[in-house]
Image (cartoon, rainbow, N blue to C red):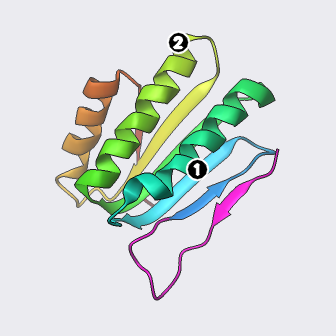
Amino acid sequence: MKSLVINAEVDSPYYPEVNFDADTGICDISGESYMEEAYKFYLPLINWMKEFVLNEKKTLVFNVKLIYFNTSSSRLILDIFDMLKKFRDDGHKIKVNWFYDPDDPDVKDEVEDFEIESGMDIEMIKFS
């Protein structure tokens, strides 16, 4: 299985940077996510995670380092959490970390909403 890397582009700030490492199982998404057709961007990420969990038999660690995301992105992030919870419930090793700025008052509420809606445990980690 190949790693999935999407580099952030300076002239296109709407798309996050993605680094899903097939060797380690560490999946990082960072930056901002507010593209118009979020589904087209997130579908390859979702498919990669499915393939990794089902075929690699390693722990998948999903690190979210988004400083901003729109409603469309939020829905797809929730879809990812729903999928990861199902995999975890089926016995696969899944860990989700959300890195956040402690000065951002809204992010904790948003992550708590994701936890409640998906049932997935999300560890919140302050940016250092």
Residue 12: give x, y in percent of width and height. 44, 81
Residue 1 visible in the picture: yes
User: What is the three-letter code of the residue carrying label 1?
Assistant: Pro
Classify 10 Å Cα crowding around label 2: few (below 14), some (14-19), many (20 and above).
Answer: few
User: Which quarter of the figure is the C terminus placed in?
Assistant: bottom left
Classify 10 Å Cα crowding around label 1: few (below 14), some (14-19), many (20 and above).
Answer: few
Residue 88: give x, y in percent of width and height. 55, 18
- Which of the two discs, 2 and 1, labels the residue nearer the N terminus? 1
At horizontal 55% and vertical 42% (from top left) the residue drawn is 46
> Furthest residue to the bottom?
11
Disc 2 marks which residue? 89
SS at mark 2 in the image: helix
At horizontal 35% and vertical 21% (from top left) the residue drawn is 119
Residue 25: give x, y in percent of width and height. 71, 41
Residue span colored magenta: 1-16
Q: Which mark is residue 44?
A: 1
Q: Is residue 23 left or right of residue 120?
A: right
Judge whether 21 appears above or below 59 on screen.
below
User: What is the three-letter code of the residue carrying label 2?
Assistant: Asp
Q: Is residue 117 left or right of residue 19?
A: left
